[in-house]
Image (cartoon, coloured by chain):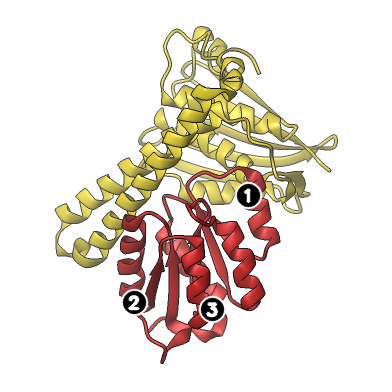
């Protein structure tokens, strides 16, 4: 793994430990906040459009914060995967179900029937796919497309996520998985670095192609067996 | 305790060292038709399981005094049929694998997806509980 992620892997020492511990504690607090917001929604959510709207905002912001903290922890903690039989079609469907897709974005799924299962840590691959979808959706709006395709070829399983967003410049593309090369970076870049890292920990790899004005395609390639 | 011996199948034990987590989960679960008892660590939870019949235990993995995985092992020795769902904010894979090996129904991640958790609880309790 190039760039910042290598440095991050070196944060296995005291600093990494501090980040992981504080991240764990922060996530616990966010968990309490989320439960509270959920309870309020149960009790008063039906009392007006604005109340529902604000509870929704609260829940969404808590989820984003938790996502950012989770990526920070994954960046500093090289977790050992726990492999089991993983169904990539099911993982993709689950990620699309729980992701917040911007209103007006058209989702097309072309998932290969009878796609073989792979031996991998399903939770880690789910998080990798989620990070990709979150990053892609950040650039999408009304009437944009997100097409998800799964297929098998040459002993490997492929999941392609293609968007019709603004696309990336060569400079952005070069720094996409490498925070050292990125001119500036955001939580989205960190999410992609983590996505690549989790994929590689499970013996797969991520590919990306992009053209400005046309869109971006991420491909997760995983070996079968 | 907000539950009662007369309705053990509706009685859930929520185990977490974070009081806010216990209180908020208790309110949500009570609102969803369950009765709730609470424990602040694994040791306290095991003691409660010795004397009270629960329909399900919802327990954090990382806790002081006795962690959730150790408590799970002891609970399963006392009551092998007791469904236990484990919770974690961020846990190393080895701990999650050990929880599954010890017989946890599943492991859920904080912040919790409450509708999903309610489904899991009902599924784990099988036909012994249906939403009122």
Q: Answer yes or no: do the residues labelled 2 and 3 have beta carbons within 8 Å?
A: no
Q: Colour of chain A?
A: yellow
Q: Nearer the viewer, residue A125 or A70?
A: A70
Residue at 49% from the left image edge and 16% from the top image edge:
A168
Residue closest to the eye, B111 or A220? B111
Q: CA distance from mark 1 to mark 2?
A: 29 Å
Residue A38 in the image: state x and y as whole percent. 30, 58
Look at the image and tell me in which quarter the N terminus of chain A lies: top right
Residue B95: mark in rendering: 1
One can see residue A211 in this view: yes
Q: Residues within 10 Å of mark 2 (few under 14, many from 20)?
A: few
What residue sits 45% from the left and 40% below the top? A24
Looking at the image, tell me whether mark 1 or mark 2 is earlier in sequence order.
2
Residue in the image at 28% along x and 62% along y = A39
> Is label 2 on the same chain as label 3?
yes
Q: Residue furthest bottom?
A: B6
Q: Which residue is mark 3?
A: B50
State which chain disc 2 sits on: B
Residue position for label 2 = B1
Q: Nearer the viewer, mark 1 or mark 2?
A: 2
User: Eyeballing the image, is A190 above or below A183?
Assistant: below
Give SS at disc 2: loop
**Helix, strand or loop status at disc 3:** helix
Q: CA distance from mark 3 to mark 1?
A: 24 Å
Residue A196, percent from left and from top: 62, 27
From this view, report whether residue B85 is shown above or below residue A34: below
């Amino acid at each position: 793994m190039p760039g910042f992620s290598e440095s991050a892997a070196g944060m296995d020492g005291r600093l990494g430990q501090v980040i992981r511990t504080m991240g764990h504690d922060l996530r616990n607090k966010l968990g309490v906040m989320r439960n509270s917001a959920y309870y309020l929604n149960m009790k008063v959510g039906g009392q007006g459009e604005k109340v529902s709207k604000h509870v929704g905002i609260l829940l969404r912001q808590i989820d984003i914060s938790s996502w950012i903290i989770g990526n920070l922890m994954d960046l500093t903690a090289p977790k050992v995967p726990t492999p089991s039989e993983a169904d990539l079609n099911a993982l993709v469907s689950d990620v699309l179900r729980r992701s917040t897709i911007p209103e007006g974005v058209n989702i097309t799924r072309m998932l290969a029937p009878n796609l073989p299962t792979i031996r991998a840590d399903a939770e880690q691959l789910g998080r990798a796919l989620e990070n990709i979808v979150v990053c892609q959706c950040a650039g999408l709006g009304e009437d944009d497309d997100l097409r998800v395709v799964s297929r098998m070829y040459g002993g490997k399983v492929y999941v392609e996520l293609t968007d019709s967003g603004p696309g990336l410049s060569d400079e952005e593309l070069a720094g996409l998985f490498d925070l050292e090369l990125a001119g500036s970076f955001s939580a989205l870049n960190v999410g992609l670095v983590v996505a690549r890292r989790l994929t590689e920990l499970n013996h797969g790899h991520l590919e990306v192609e992009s053209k400005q004005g046309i869109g971006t395609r991420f491909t997760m390639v995983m070996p079968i067996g | 305790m907000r539950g009662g011996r007369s309705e053990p199948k509706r009685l859930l034990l929520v185990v977490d060292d974070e009081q806010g987590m216990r209180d908020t989960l208790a309110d949500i679960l009570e609102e969803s038709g369950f009765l709730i008892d609470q424990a602040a660590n694994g040791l306290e939870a095991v003691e409660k399981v010795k004397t009270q019949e629960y329909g399900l235990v919802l327990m954090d993995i990382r806790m002081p005094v006795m962690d959730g995985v150790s408590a799970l092992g002891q609970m399963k020795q006392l009551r092998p049929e007791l469904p236990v769902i484990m919770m974690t904010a961020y846990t190393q894979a080895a701990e999650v694998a050990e929880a599954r090996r010890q017989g946890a129904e599943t492991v859920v991640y904080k912040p919790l997806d409450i509708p999903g958790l309610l489904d899991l609880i009902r599924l784990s309790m099988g036909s012994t509980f249906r939403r009122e």
